[in-house]
Amino acid sequence: MSVYVSWPSAPLTNSLVHKALAQISVPISFISKEQVRLSSGRLLQWSTYDDIDHELAHVHRDRVLSSSYTFRKALIRKHFLSRIIQSYTKKIPGSVLRDAFPRTFEIELSFADELDEMWTDELWELGEELDSGRSWWILKPGMADRGMGIRIFHSKEDLQQIFEAFEEIESDGENEHERKNEGQTSVITSQLRHFVIQEYVNAPMLMDPSQTLNKMSTTDDLVGRKFHLRVYCVSKANIQVYVYNRILALFSAVPYTSLTSEDLSDINLKAHLTNTSLQTDLGDINVRLLDDLEGCHVLSDESGVTLTSTNINDLVTEISEVLSEVFRAGLQNPVHFQALPNAFELFGVDFLVNHAPNHASNKFQVKILEINAEPAIELTGPRLTWILEDLFASTAKVCVEPFFTGKKDEQSWGIGEVKYNFVKCMDENIRGSGHFPQADPVG
């Protein structure tokens, strides 16, 4: 089997792929990009999206396996994800996605002065919400990553101020206060026309990551911090979906504070944005395993409860159910997501845990925030690199080896069962997948 591996800007991923391939039972021979087209036998392309020969994979589906679907922007672009979920929940109102995705609006503009007309047209409903003052909202560029351009606001005036600030930074250059307070998250609005506006989840589960080192700590010694869950998810062929059950908890750098300020400049974004890219100065000190939080106090609950193994198992089950529905929603839009029989892909999915202590049956509810292709796994940090090694080895065992050996265990692997630390959450045969439409070729 010929293997083409290329991760020019991700040396850790490159190393993990090579280690994973060394553990499968198929003899391999590494080739260069120039040799890919010359290859006539079995071929694996485990590379960054841009280095994969997608046409070759389309023509030779029986012998060429690729590490990315060609069309998947329905999942990985924020505004597309919002659209497919809204469309899906209208068709299937009983879907778990109805409560597992924050209320979201789309906005497309290049300059701040365009907002005035939008309040009476496409943003009328959002304007009504902002006028009511009931909720805070979070602005996210539709195609940016690593926390770029994210802002929090709660009024029309706030949003106007945010876009005006982006324009000032574009014309005058970013000042020192902007870099210090917002972690170099500024964007150029005219280059990022698409934005999503999501309702801010104002009741996040709060915990203190330091308690994983001393479970005997009392609540007096702890400080509640916001965190989100980074879930690694692998999809295969057309289509099985697996959740890697070693889930990361990524904590904010500073203690959580409720959003009560009337002045946006008083909001410390690091207390509310848990994106690891914004907190690189702290290394991996705020990265924990979800399993490590068992027995730790839930500081958003004044009754002193701790997170139990049952709570964690319930969260994994919730996550699996939500992800299976998200992929089903994506499949409803074949122009922007196609599950190919000879492809697999690793995604990094971000979830927030909403804490509803008064809920009768489910106090901890997951909210899916976004799905990332080629996730920035290096931010996991050296302490938990072993997790990544196991993840990639499992991916090779589940996705690569069966394609080239013909040995499959799908029939004996039921939904909810765990193998190789993968929880299978979806297994459907989508016939006719992968026919290329006349559409934007960018995945």
Image (tube, helix red, strand yellow):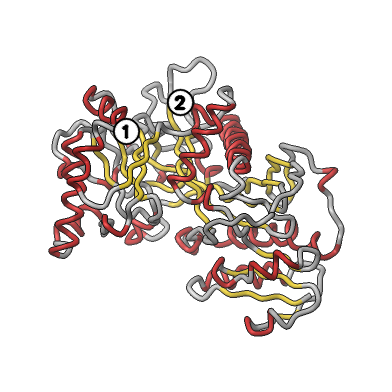
Query: How many other residues sit within 10 Å of disc 2, few (<14), some (14-19) or many (≥20)?
Result: few
For the point 61% across and 68% down, the residue is 16
Drawn side of residue 78 relative to residue 159, left or right: right
Quadrant position of residue 322: top right
Quadrant position of residue 405: bottom right
Residue 154: x and y in percent read 23, 33
Residue 74: x and y in percent read 53, 48
For the point 27% across and 57% down, the residue is 190
Q: Indicate whether 48 appears above or below 433.
A: below
Question: Is there a contact, CB below 8 Å, between mark 2 and mark 1?
Answer: no
Query: How many other residues sit within 10 Å of disc 1, few (<14), some (14-19) or many (≥20)?
Result: few
Residue linked to disc 1: 220
Could you say whether the residue bearing mark 2 is in a helix, strand or loop? Answer: loop
Drawn side of residue 381 relative to residue 58, left or right: left
Kind of residue sitting beneath label 1: Asp
Seen as rendered, the residue at the extreme front is 438
Drawn side of residue 363 relative to residue 185, left or right: right
Q: Nearer the viewer, mark 2 or mark 1?
A: 2
Kind of residue sitting beneath label 2: Val
Residue 47: x and y in percent read 60, 69
- In the foreground, 255 or 54: 54
> How many badges with numbers are in the image?
2
User: Residue 305: which numbered mark, if any?
Assistant: 2
Residue 28: x and y in percent read 77, 76
Drawn side of residue 433 relative to residue 232, left or right: right
- In the foreground, 188 or 345: 188
Name the N-terminal-most of marks 2 and 1. 1
Q: Indicate whether 362 appears above or below 75.
A: above
- In the picture, the quarter occupied by the C terminus is bottom right
Q: Indicate whether 68 appears above or below 220.
A: below
